[in-house]
């Protein structure tokens, strides 16, 4: 049983520990602009909460979480659905356009191998419209209560969304990179277990270098992404795909104290 932690506004905790998720943390407490900070107990990120028990769902309730935003593909959701209690709102908001089913064999297996080393800049460039929809879902859901958003490991897709939210709030690149980099530490056992569960024919094709890229969340990865995002004008991209500058300002106000 997970020991329940009674947190308050005066006693916040960034990382909340669970039995069945490893990479759960609060995006509050970061210094932003104009001497403000990102609000505690509003927005959380994590790996997929598909195996939570009743005690863990109660922790979600105690944290005020009302909405779960799932960034995974249709295939990932079908293979590992989230069986959330009825008092939580579940939003399927996949990051990628590609929604074909895959079985990790043949050509699908090759695509999987390529995905382990995909550049975050390529991911974001190819998913601009989907990212704008994710931001809209987050903004709308914040009106109902606290939110947790996640992908499978809470590292890549979740990392990009978390980074851009923190940047909208005026958080420094150093803090955004630090928030990203800690995932590798929290997720080590989880990702190793996931990789070990892959079919043997896939594992045999994974070089040590590929395995390292799959599990890593190195500072240089996020540093390169943030440089690209700034150069590309990410807020303008969001605006052009429907998440307007006004919406971005509203999101910022909801997440700052």
Image (spheres, rainbow, N blue to C red):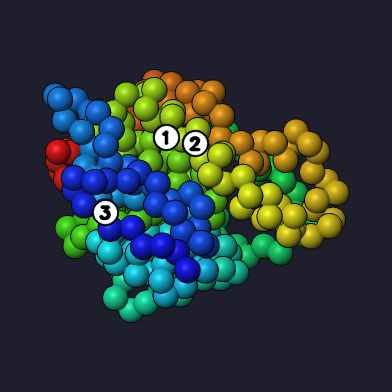
Q: How many marks?
A: 3
- Nearer to the camera, 89 or 51: 51
Q: Compared to 134, does 225 lie above or below?
A: above
Query: How far is the residue under mark 3 from the one under mark 2?
Result: 22 Å
Say if residue 1 shows up in the picture: yes
Could you tell whether 224 is left or right of 132 in the image? right
Residue depicted at x 29% and y 76%:
87
Q: Which residue does the numbered mark 3 point to in the structure image?
A: 7
Closest to the camera, between mark 3 and mark 2, is 3
Q: Are marks 3 and 2 in contact (CB under 8 Å)?
A: no
- Nearer to the camera, 146 or 126: 146
Residue depicted at x 39% and y 42%:
161
Q: Compared to 88, does 33 lie above or below?
A: above
Q: Secondary structure at mark 1?
A: helix
Query: How far is the residue under mark 1 from the one under mark 2?
Result: 6 Å
Could you tell whether 159 is left or right of 257 in the image? right
Q: Are marks 1 and 2 in contact (CB under 8 Å)?
A: yes
Q: Position of residue 79 (x, y in %)?
A: 60, 69
Give me the disc on residue 179: 1
Q: Position of residue 85 (x, y in %)?
A: 37, 77
- Nearer to the camera, 63 or 94: 63
Q: Secondary structure at mark 2?
A: loop
Q: Earlier in the sequence, mark 3 or mark 2?
A: 3
Q: Position of residue 46 (x, y in %)?
A: 44, 52
Q: Secondary structure at mark 3?
A: loop
Residue depicted at x 78% and y 36%:
208
Q: Position of residue 197 (x, y in %)?
A: 73, 59
Quick one: label 1, few (<14), some, or many (20+) residues within 10 Å? many
Q: Which residue does the numbered mark 2 point to in the structure image?
A: 182
Could you tell whether 199 is left or right of 221 in the image? right
């Amino acid at each position: 049983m997970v020991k329940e932690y009674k947190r308050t506004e005066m006693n916040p905790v960034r990382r909340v520990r669970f039995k069945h998720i490893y990479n759960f943390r609060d995006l509050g407490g970061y210094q932003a602009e104009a001497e403000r900070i990102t609000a505690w107990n509003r927005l959380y990120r994590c790996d997929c909460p598909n195996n939570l028990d009743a005690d863990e769902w109660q922790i979600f309730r105690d944290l005020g979480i009302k909405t779960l935003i799932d960034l995974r593909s249709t295939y990932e959701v079908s293979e590992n659905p989230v069986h959330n209690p009825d008092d939580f709102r579940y939003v399927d908001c996949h990051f990628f356009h590609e929604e074909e089913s895959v079985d990790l064999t043949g050509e699908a297996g090759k695509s999987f191998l390529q995905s382990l080393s995909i550049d975050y800049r390529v991911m974001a460039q190819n998913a601009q419209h989907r990212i704008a929809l994710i931001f809209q879902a987050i903004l709308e859901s914040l009106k109902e209560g606290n939110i947790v958003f996640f992908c499978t490991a809470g590292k890549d897709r979740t990392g990009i969304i978390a980074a851009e939210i923190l940047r909208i709030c005026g958080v420094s690149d150093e803090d955004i990179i630090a928030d990203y980099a800690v995932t590798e530490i929290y997720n080590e056992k989880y990702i190793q277990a996931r990789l070990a569960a892959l079919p043997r024919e896939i594992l045999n094709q994974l070089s040590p270098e590929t395995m390292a890229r799959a599990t890593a969340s190195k500072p240089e990865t996020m540093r390169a992404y943030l440089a690209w995002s700034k150069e590309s004008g990410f807020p303008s991209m969001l605006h052009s795909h429907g998440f307007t500058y006004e919406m971005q300002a509203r999101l910022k106000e909801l997440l700052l104290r």
